[in-house]
Amino acid sequence: MTGSSPTSIGLFDSGLGGLTVLRGMLRALPGPNYFYLGDNARFPYGTKGHDTIVRYARECSQFLVSQEVGVLIVACNTASAAALHVLENELSIPVIGTIGPAVRQALSRSKSGKIGVLGTNATIASGVYRQGILALDATARVSEQACPLFVPLVEAGMLRGEIVDKVVELYLKPLKEQRVDTVILGCTHYPLLVESIQAFMGPDVSIVECSDAIASDVVALLGPKESSAAPGRVNYFVTDEVGRFNFLASAFLEGQVVSAVRIDSF
């Protein structure tokens, strides 16, 4: 185990999607040591029930806390929607989810107040983005769309092409018809499909990725000194097959070599 550090940061997701958050963190804050856990044995979270997601989130968090991280990022929208408040109440370290930062950024960008939200079935069913937006701006008009095929496409490495474009059109056509001017990518997998999403919605629609918003929140928490520090070490863990994760993770992280360690149990 890597030695403890007050600025070590832990992140977890059901698989690969949280790597988009890690990528944003490494750009904004290269200094800390990072511990990333991809719970690929139990992927995807988006189709699971609320209590199951909370249990998974607890177990992933406990593992990362055992690595002596000083900050925990729930790099999964589904887990943030279901379990963020539970983790905040149970853990003694700062816990940052995906939803609050993305909501604030979307409201700051939207000119019309018409905001679209894309997410897994579980995230959309929770209504957490709608509630978060309306709590800050009761006049906003929120359109939500579950996109259950997006995550399997990303996990299969299908990030562009005719099939992706057709699926994007299927899900985003209602939002385009409602003339939203801002779209929240309410799943950490979805930024890998951003080219097709932006192309379909058009250049005037702002696409909000939670990774940038989360990075800003962590910079505010830890202070700017970490932004210019020498790069720390990134430690990768998975709960299932390692080879495929390493291969696809390298693509997510712009060619960086990834060597994950499999953990058999929590």
Image (tube, grey):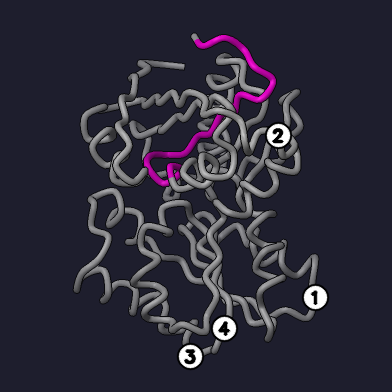
At mark 3, the secondary structure is helix
At mark 2, the secondary structure is helix
User: Distance between the Cα atoms at labels 1 and 4?
Assistant: 16 Å
Residue under circle 1?
138
Residue 80 versus residue 200: which sits nearer the camera?
200
Against 29, residue 120 (above or below) is below
Of labels 2 and 4, earlier in sequence is 4
Residue 116, numbered label: none
Query: What's the residue at 36%, 43% (across, down)?
Result: 253
Query: What's the residue at 42%, 39% (across, down)?
Result: 14
Residue 231 versus residue 166: which sits nearer the camera?
231
Residue under circle 3?
177
Of labels 2 and 3, earlier in sequence is 3
Of labels 1 and 2, earlier in sequence is 1
From the viewer's perspective, tell me whether residue 247 is left or right of residue 103.
left
Tell whether label 4 touches label 1 (CB within 8 Å): no
Q: What residue type is labelled 4?
A: Val
Image location (x, y in percent) of residue 183: 54, 72
Image location (x, y in percent) of residue 32: 59, 27
Of labels 1 and 4, earlier in sequence is 1
At mark 1, the secondary structure is loop
